[in-house]
Structure formats: structure tokens, C-alpha cells
Amino acid sequence: MAFQYKAPQRDIQFVMHDVLGLENLYAGLPKFADTNRELIDSIVEAGAQFCEGELAPLNRSGDEEGCTFNNGEVTTPKGFKEAYAKYVELGFGALSAEPEHGGQGLPPTIGIALSEMMGTANWSFGMYPGLSHGAINTVEAHGTPEQKETYLTKLVSGEWTGTMCLTEPHAGSDLGIIRTKAEPNADGSYAITGTKIFISAGEHDLADNIIHITLARLPDAPKGTKGISLFIVPKFLPDGTRNTVACGSIEHKMGIKASATCVMNFDNAKGFLIGPPNRGLNCMFTFMNTARIGTAIQGLAAAEGSFQGALEYARDRLAMRALSGPAFPEKEADPIIVHPAVRQLLLTQKAFAEGGRLLCYWLSTQNDVIQGSESEEARKQADELLSFLTPIAKAFLTEVGYESANHGVQVYGGHGFIREWGMEQIVRDTRIALLYEGTTQIQALDLLGRKVLQTQGGLLKNFTRIVHKFAEANKDNAELAQFLTPLTALNKEWGDLTMKIGMKAMQNPNEVGAAAVDYLFYSGYVTLAYLWALMAKTAQDKIAAGEGDKAFYEAKIKTAQFYFKKILPRTKGHVEAIDGGLDVLMQMDVESFAF
Amino acid sequence: MAFQYKAPQRDIQFVMHDVLGLENLYAGLPKFADTNRELIDSIVEAGAQFCEGELAPLNRSGDEEGCTFNNGEVTTPKGFKEAYAKYVELGFGALSAEPEHGGQGLPPTIGIALSEMMGTANWSFGMYPGLSHGAINTVEAHGTPEQKETYLTKLVSGEWTGTMCLTEPHAGSDLGIIRTKAEPNADGSYAITGTKIFISAGEHDLADNIIHITLARLPDAPKGTKGISLFIVPKFLPDGTRNTVACGSIEHKMGIKASATCVMNFDNAKGFLIGPPNRGLNCMFTFMNTARIGTAIQGLAAAEGSFQGALEYARDRLAMRALSGPAFPEKEADPIIVHPAVRQLLLTQKAFAEGGRLLCYWLSTQNDVIQGSESEEARKQADELLSFLTPIAKAFLTEVGYESANHGVQVYGGHGFIREWGMEQIVRDTRIALLYEGTTQIQALDLLGRKVLQTQGGLLKNFTRIVHKFAEANKDNAELAQFLTPLTALNKEWGDLTMKIGMKAMQNPNEVGAAAVDYLFYSGYVTLAYLWALMAKTAQDKIAAGEGDKAFYEAKIKTAQFYFKKILPRTKGHVEAIDGGLDVLMQMDVESFAF
């Protein structure tokens, strides 16, 4: 009874071609110059078929069955092994990897489209190859030639998978206090000892080997974040021996039950240093940015999937009459999509799904530029934009994606609470996205503290300049004024707000923490406002040119209007909450919270 | 590892005695004149012991085990039967029922305190006796003397339980289209045939008999809501025969897994008409108002429970340093309660839990007055206030309770997603509260359409007058100005906003639907602002009088300050979203939502 996932190929094409003009972009990036529209569309179509046909049907059953743990081994739900084999066979894991180790060398954004479709069809499944990407990126960026030789080909093909072993029972966001030890062995390797928790894909039955990228401390390493090194710890060593890293148990979770979340015990496991000693956290950031975009996609996937389900139900389910009189007098009641409050839920999901899609893909094109451009200036600009937008995409999109998932349940009424309809699963699966890869609160501090204030507003100005240029270029476009007038005002307010917080923060650094989360939401709503204005402009151009399906483009403009009138007002509350200041947060004694 | 529930007796006493002055209130209601403070506190304390000692320990295990269905029979999780027997033995079911059938005749508000504590300790358990209350109220209000004689004593004692059988597979919110039939039998009873779904406590192993209060249609009944009658359909007939009503299956749900949600098949089951023919829906409203307050309490319970868990964790968990410098330099990191963003989550939970408590109890005192007052005018006023506040309490408190539950997960970081900590269970258990007993959207229509606009703003004016009087009475109180100034502005804005919507609605009734949900949230935030101002004033008086624990009262004032500075700003967004109007919701063709 759960809804049938249908990959939104039309909208993906709109984002990729109409808005972002990928073919043009890649023509200017020699490394990716062969990636033309035909190739892109054919990959998206192949991905769509795989996700609709193989992954979506395993989503509910995977949730019901979950992973099972038995004596160190993890069994994935029925069908996952076969689907993963097909994924490897179809070469989907290798899309964006470097060609020298078997990758197809395509721009990262092509992989993002696949990640979106896999994620919406079956988020738990996507976790297994998703984690491998992080390991691949880390080895590509920091591995020695020998390490690349040993690990990359099989990671890229998907015959092996990877993990990132960071968290420990007492240390999550605060990696500076991890305790796992790495003692040098005589042969140049290290003996790794410690316990890691929350390790996604730490153990499973999908692949022949699992490569754990692991944070640990060398003997006499400095305290804190500057004393952490990175190690490759394979489940099976290159000579085939079983290493002494083992799964101790798996977690029982709210959602993503088909994704194994493992406790990993390292008992003098053999590890190999990757990157310079004590610089592990820096090396890790390579991975973390990828992971954060990957998690942002979970917000997009939640909005898209729950929207698809809710739309189907809202068109079918009959209840009550339209307030303006029966819309379908011949039926015993009207379909619930006639009700404004139901439409508000659906349009909210739609605005976040489609706006979130553009944000993720646009963000990803910055990676395309970083990897493919020969201009240092272009790479620097892309890197700064990526750096600024990553915490917004990660935190804001997962928050509004979770909101959208809840709207999906709401449209179904009581049926939304019943497992067989699939709506509540999206809520449960998505809840983790606000937590892993840095909570919303951590992302908010990253945005306001590190990205905005530490650059004296430089990264923010880069962005507001883009918005300003867009508004200037279209200032005589009367039909865009409905978007550009409020957008321009917000663009200015954003700077003023930042200045005000910055001044207060000079007096007391806690002001940053007090403002950060509201500031993050504010930034997210404004960022999406820019992207919706951009989509409206694109649609307007297409309609004027008489190209494509007019109804499709008109729907874009209508959704933009909805976004500006019904969602963007939320910025008001965040501005005033920031004005509310720090004192009301700090004045309560720890003992006085409860009596 | 899940947190230990501790009944908030101190805060319940604050609400009952300091703010609402129950002893005084009851002194003026002859029926309840014996209910003094000592009696109230002793019942709350007995309830607290039962909830902490018997119910809370079954909450996690009940969720893991769930109910099981086998051949028409439902088994509740381990320990539920014994706990229910104890509940009956302690007489908790009989607190607020009429003495002539074994009730203790206490004011409804005393029962509300017990409902809150049971609900926070173990919502699923509370569903079983909770549903009985609805059946008891219905039989008390509409039953014949014989029906009362036959059913009430055992329902009141708890030996039997009750249900409300409304929903059918195709009819939830829209009861006008139900199809269950009632054919007259020769003996004056009726043969009931049809299928009801989502019947909480429809079948279980806790009680000897189950009394189903059932909606069905008489032959030739008018179409729609005016052709529905109400029937008593017992599982076992008064002569001991097993009736032909049976559980066909139970639902697999997101949460409240220890509460059996049943499909009930009526196969010529013997039923007895209660209340006048074709007036079943009106009789049902008696019950529905009780059920809606009961569901509002689920929002309060979610906020309270998740706050207790999150507070404990935030005091214990060490991660990062305070932005203003190490708070506990001797520890390896600071407890996360030092971070403003964590405090914002905790204070939000606290503000909704304590504000929600006062709203529920205050609402309930209107029932005390309705049942106990000898003044018709007082009863009318109470009834109107109850009528106005019920959709606000039901929808707003469940929404912000659900938000609070999610904050609980957020404070725990990744651990919040793990079942053993208990935080994610509160999210799953609470999600249904936004759906059953009328969704948020239905409540919003009830508030704006029926309660506000259909009374030409009369019910709203009753309320704003209370706020106005409060502000006037305290206008020279300099320390209250921080609350009264914004509250007075909102009180006026509320009226203006209503007028504006009312004018637009005269042109197009869909305007009501477009504004309703934002209007409901707005109304909720303003209502809670009044209650927080009232609590601040109460605390101020206590401090001035040197009575009680000063730190407790100071915390009340600080929480009020937090609420006004950090939560109340949300009203801005809702006002502007209402201004955003109807068109952006309606202009999208049904076919253009997706391509």
C-alpha cells in the first residue's frame, strides 16, 4: 500500500539543464568537457530505473526486517545483497571516481543525482555505498600511491565498502577527546585499540571487505584536536588475514533500520597511517564536506518522497466538501486536495523538495568546479561558496525535510501513523539527518562562527553579491518584482543582522551561540528565496521562448509565489528571536531548570 | 538507560493552588466544596507514586513488546494486566465519576492531574482507562436509567472498559459518510453491521468486558451527519452471551505500540440505542470535548517527559567548551547545558510543558464550573471559554509537544535516535496526537470557522477581555510591563487579524481554510503568553510575600522572560503568512503539483 516512488526526472533535468546549464559549465571545465546532456540524461534514466525497480520495493520490507546481528556478523534485510550486487554491476559506485582506479571520472553532480534517487527510494540502502564515497575521497586525497593501489580499485568498483570511524561512546561532536590509541608496530603499521560507536556500514554481508578509516591517537600525541591521526584499518588485511577489528553489536534505532549502525571494537587491530601524523582531523574534513552534502540530500529525499506519497493520497482520499461548495457533487465527498490547509502542506513539501534539489545540485557544481577548473580564482570562489553553503544545506534542508516528512504523515490523517502506508517511515528515517554529521546546532555554530564572523562577513558577502547581481540584472523585469523586491530587502537585512550579532559577539562570545540556530534558519530561508526567484526567472524565460511544457514552467512560478508568500514570512520570527538576545538563555541556574 | 520519570508534583501544586486557587474555586461550587488542598495533594501524591513506580517502568518494555493479536484476541505487553489491576484497586478510574455509580465525585481537574502523570509515565497504558472516560461520560449524559444501571458501575470501577467506535476505512474526519448499519430487532435492540477502524482499546486482556459506544445509521436515516445514531454494543451482553462484535486485526503503528488499535467487525452485533435517533453526532460531542482535552494532555506529557530526559542528559554529558571559556576546567569538557543552543532547546520544552500544564488544568476547571456551579451565568461563561480554548489546547499543545519531543532527541545527539534512551519513543508516541480526535487542520477550522467567525468574534472577545482585565489590573506594576506591553499589543492584533480574515471570508469561504492553521498557531502562542504573564505575576506575588521557595518562583519569571523573547516572536511569521492570502494556495491545478 506504500506509495510507489517515481524518480523526478523532469525536475532533475530542469535543475541540471535549465537552471544550472551543466553542459555549458562542463564545456568550460576541460576535465569534464565530454559530459554532455545526452550522457547526463542517460545516466539519470538508468539510475531512475534502478531506484524505482530495485531499491524502492525493498524500502518497507527493509524497515520491517532490519539488520540482524549474530556473533560478530551482520545480515542485511532480504534482497539487499542482490540489489547491491546489481548496483556494483551497473557501475553506479564508480561514476564520480578518478579513472586511474576504475572510476568513470564524471563530475560529482552526476553522482548527486543518483544519491538523491537512491536516497528517496531507500535511504538505508544508500548508506552502504554512501559511506564508501567518504572512504574513497579520503584515500584519493591523502593516501600514498601504495595505499591508493591497494584500496581504491575495489572501493571504487564497490566490491569493497568503506566506513568512517570517528565517534566514541563519550565523544561525538567533540572529537578532541577521543581515546582510541595507535601504537607503532615494528613493520611501520600501527596497533589500533579502542571502541567506536555509531559506525554506519561497520559490518554487513554486502561486500568482501570493509575498509575502516579510523581516528586514533599516537603515543604522546598532543591533547585535543591537534593530536588525532587517521588510519586505514581493513577488515581483511591485504594478505587476506582477518584483522582484529570486529562488530560488537548493532544499535536498535528509531529508523534507517536496514542500515547497520555498529559498535566496532579495535583490539590491537593493524592500521596504516594515512596523511601526516596528528593531522587526522584536517584530513577528515575532506570527507566531512562530502558527507554533509550527502546528508543535506537526505532532507531533499524526505521532502520529495513524502510529497509524492501525500500528493497521491490527497488526490484520492475523499473527505468533507470544499468550503466554497462541492467540487465533485457526484462523489460522496471531495478529494482532500480541494482544502486550502491540505494544499498548504503539499506546497510546503513541494517548495522544499524542489528548492532543496537546486540547493544540493548547485552546491555540488562547486565541487565540479573545484575538481575541474583550471582557473585558481574560479576554484577559490567555488570553494568559498561551498564552504558557506554546506552548513546551510546540511542543517536547513534536513530540518525542513523532516518538517516535510511530518506533513506527509499529516496529509494521511490517522493512516499516516500506520506503518504500511510508508509515511511514518520517512519521518523515522529522516530524524537522524538532524543529528549525524554534526547536529543542527553544530552546523549553526559553523555557519555563524567560523564561516561568517571569522571571515569578517567575507563569505556572506560573496553570496549576497550573487543575489545582488541577480536582482540588478533583472530590475526592469516587472513580473519578477514580486520576488526581487522582498529578496533585495532580505539580502540587506541579512548583512545588518550579521553586523549586529558580530558587534554583540565582541562583548561576549556566547552571543554567537545564542543567535546561531535562528541565524541558520534565517539564512536557509533567504538562500531558498534566491533559488526560487532564480527558478521563476528560468521558467519565465522558457515560457517566453515557447520552449518545453508550459504547464511545468507555470507551476514553477506558482510554487515560487507560494514560497514567498507563505514560507518566507518565517524569517520575521527568527529575526525577532535573535533580537531576544542571550540573557534569557543564560540567566537560569542549572539547578533551577526543574524542581 | 531511559530516564526515570519523576512526577512534577511541585509544579502541579503551583498550577493548582498558586495560580488557579482550586480550594477557593471549589469552596464556591457546592458540589465540590469538600475538595480541599489536603485531599487534592494526597491524591496527586498517590497518583505520582503509582505512575513513577508502576507505569514508567513498563513504558520502554511495552513499546518493544507491543500488543499481539491472535485469533480475535489481543494480549497487552507484560506487566500491563497487573498494573491495570492495581489502577482499578487504587480507585483511580473512579475519581471524577458520579457517586451514584461508585464514583468519588471529585472535580474533573483532579482526574486531569492523574491523566497527565499517567500519560507522561506511559501514554499507551493511559489509553485504556482514557477511552473508558469517554464511554462513561456518554452513558452518564445520554443513557437511560437502565443503561446507567447496567453499565456505569463496572465502567467506573474499571472492571469493564469502554471504546468509542467512530472511524470507518473510508470515513475519518468526515463522519457524515459512515456506512455501519443498525437494523431494529423485535426486542427493541438493534443489529449492528459494519467495520470500524482505529478503535483504541477495542480488544485487550485487561478487563472482563468492553463496552463499545458505536456510531451507525438507522434504516432510512437522512444522509450526512444528521442521520447518525449512537449505540451501546457490549462485547458480552448483560446476560453473559458473547456478542458478535470482534477484533479482526490490530494496526502496526509508528508509536503507542502497547495501545491496541483495532479493526472491529460488527456482524449483526446486538446494540442498544443511546440518546435520540439520528442525534448520535450531537451526543458524541459530549465525549469529543473530553477526548480533545485528553489529547491536549498528550502534548503536555510529551513536553514534560522529553524535558525531564533532556535535562538529565544535558547536565551529565560532556562535550566541547563553553564559548566564553571552560566552565569546568577540571573536567575534560563542559556539560552541554553550558551551550546557549542547548539551553534554547531545554527552555523551549520547559516553557511548553509548564505553560501547557496551566492551559490544560485551567481548561479543566471550566468543566469543574460547568458541573459544579449553581449559577447559570457562570456555567455559560465556562462553557464558552471551554469551547473556545479546546481546539487551541488540542492542536497547539500537541504540535508544540511534538516539537518538544523532537528537542529531547536533539539534546541527546546521536543517542537520541537510539531506542534504549527513550527519547525517540516520545516522538513516535506523540506523533498520533496531531492526528486523532481531529487533526490540527480540523481543529484550526473549528477554532476560526465555528468558534470565532460563527460567533461574530464573540468567543474570542470573551477571552481577550480576560487578558485585557488582567493587563489593566496590573498596569502600574513596573516589573510586569515586560510582559504586559507585548501582551496588550498582541491582544489588539488578534482582534484586528480576526476582523481582516472575517471580511475576506465573506467574499470567499476558502479564506477561512487558508488562514486557519496559521491563525491557530497564532492563537496558541498568544494564549500561552497570557498564561506565562499570569504565572510571572503569581510568582512575583509569592516572592513579595516571602512565601515558598524563592528559587522556584524566580525560575517561573525567568521562563516567562524566555517565552516572551524567544518563542512569542513566532507570531510575526504567522501574521505575515495569513497576509499571504489564499491565491497562492489555490492557483495550482491539481495536475500541476507534479510532473
Image (cartoon, coloured by chain):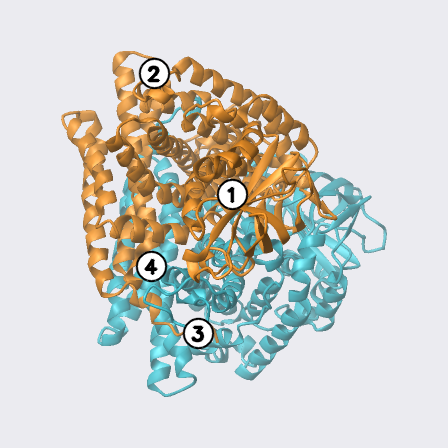
Chain colours: A orange, B cyan
| Amino acid at dot 3 | Glu
Q: Are marks 3 and 1 on the same chain?
A: no
Looking at the rendered image, the quarter that the N terminus of chain B falls into is bottom right
Q: Residues within 10 Å of mark 2 (few under 14, many from 20)?
A: some
Q: Nearer the viewer, residue A327 or A459?
A: A459
| Amino acid at dot 2 | Lys
Query: In the displayed image of the protein, which residue is found farthest to the left?
Result: A476
Q: Secondary structure at mark 4?
A: helix
Q: Residues within 10 Å of mark 3 (few under 14, many from 20)?
A: few
Q: Chain of mark 4?
A: A
Instruction: Return the disc, 1 or 4, that comes first in the chain's sequence.
Output: 1
Instruction: Return the disc, 2 or 4, that comes first in the chain's sequence.
Output: 4
Q: Nearer the viewer, residue A587 or A262?
A: A262
Q: Are marks 2 and 1 on the same chain?
A: yes
In the figure, B179 relative to B78: above or below? above
**Mark 4 — residue?**
A513
Q: Secondary structure at mark 3?
A: loop
Instruction: In the rendered structure, find residue A550 and report the number of the disc placed on it.
Output: 2
| Amino acid at dot 1 | Thr
**Mark 1 — residue?**
A430
| Amino acid at dot 4 | Gly
Q: Report, in whole angstroms, how far the alpha carbon at label 1 lies from the one at label 4.
A: 25 Å
Q: Name the mark nearer the viewer: 2 or 4.
A: 4
Q: Chain of mark 1?
A: A
Q: Report, in whole angstroms, how far the alpha carbon at label 3 lies from the one at label 1.
A: 38 Å
Q: Residues within 10 Å of mark 4 (few under 14, many from 20)?
A: many
In percent of the image, x 73 and y 51: which residue is there? Answer: B67
Instruction: Return the disc, 2 or 1, that comes first in the chain's sequence.
Output: 1
> Are circles 4 and 3 on residues that touch, CB within 8 Å?
no
> Are circles 2 and 4 on residues that touch, CB within 8 Å?
no
**Mark 3 — residue?**
B330
Q: Report, in whole angstroms, how far the alpha carbon at label 2 lies from the one at label 4.
A: 46 Å
